Image: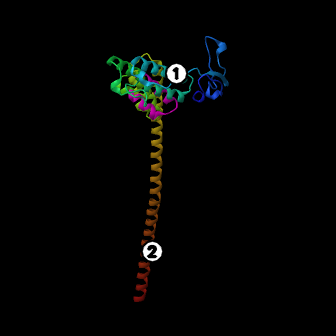
Amino acid sequence: MVIPLMNVGEIAEVTIDARFAYGSLGLKNDENENASVPADSTLIYEVHLQDCKSEDFSDLKCFEIRRKYGTRKKERANFWYNRNEYNTAIQLYRRALEFLDDRDGDPDSMFDKEDLEFSNSDLQTLLEDRLIVYNNLAMAQIKISAFDAALKSVENVLRCQPSNSKALYRKGRILEGKGDTKGAINLLQKAATLEPDSKAIQQDLAKLIIKARREEHNEKEMYQKMLGQAKKLEQKHKQPQKQQNIESSKLKLIGYLMGSILIGVAGVAIYRYKY
């Protein structure tokens, strides 16, 4: 934001707040501890603008240049991913994909796909690099629970490499996040078959199997409770009906008795009247 406002030959002192620099994690320098940046540090840079020129994307027609730019963006994205700065990593992974694509790397470039100087071997190399970035992008998206976006990323890998164990594993993680435990188990089982020595896959698969059993147990309990409640409601409905039938029978019996008594009284009265 500062450099576009500067003139060539100008020197500027730029103060950068910690949240726009290395944040609460700081930056550790293993080779030179004195060069490490402490957590929550405000940085002050002295910027010398020595020269400037308009961007020229024509060099992106060259395979080596395009791959170099894409790899640089990917490595920078990995840096931010390892710092748990997933949103920044996602932006850089997407930029890396633009460079590693076999189309023009920038929407403003003045050349078409036909102008690219790529051999079949170059295209294959770019594809393999691109699939690695898609896998990394999916993992960063999983970290922020962007499961739909992550699913699209791994599908891009699996379309080209259906047996890519990392993509299968990450798709399993995505399905788990979306609540499809059984689907996740199927994918992790495939990944475990492809990478039988992977402890991470084995551990996550074991956790998912336990989770699936727990979910199945909970479903059975819920079904039994629902069934029990339904039976109770049915019994409650039957009891008033049964009580009503008993009351009706009592009334009928009383009616019969009263009728018999009246008939008896009438018979006695008629007999006395005659005799």
Could you tell which of marks 1 and 2 lies nearer the N-terminus? 1
Provide the residue span drawn in magenta: 131-156
Q: State the image quarter where residue 201 is shown.
A: top left
Residue that protrudes farthest toward the bottom in the picture: 274
Q: How is the image coloured?
A: rainbow
Looking at the rendered image, the quarter that the C terminus falls into is bottom left
User: Which residue, given by chain and number where applicable, does mark 2 sit on?
Assistant: 258
The residue under the point 47% across, 27% down is 95
Foreground of the two, 249 or 164: 164
Q: In front here: 128 or 215?
A: 128
Residues packed near mark 1 inside 10 Å, few (<14), some (14 to 19) or many (20 plus)? some
Vertical position of residue 150 compared to residue 255: above or below: above
Q: Is residue 212 visible?
A: no
Foreground tag (1 vs 2)? 1
Q: Which labelled disc corresponds to residue 241? A: none
| Mark 2 Cα-neighbour bin, 10 Å: few <14, some 14–19, many ≥20 | few
Q: Which residue is mark 1?
A: 76
Q: Secondary structure at mark 1?
A: helix
Front residue of this view, candidates 118 and 241: 118
Image coordinates for residue 223, horizontal then vertical, percent: 45, 42
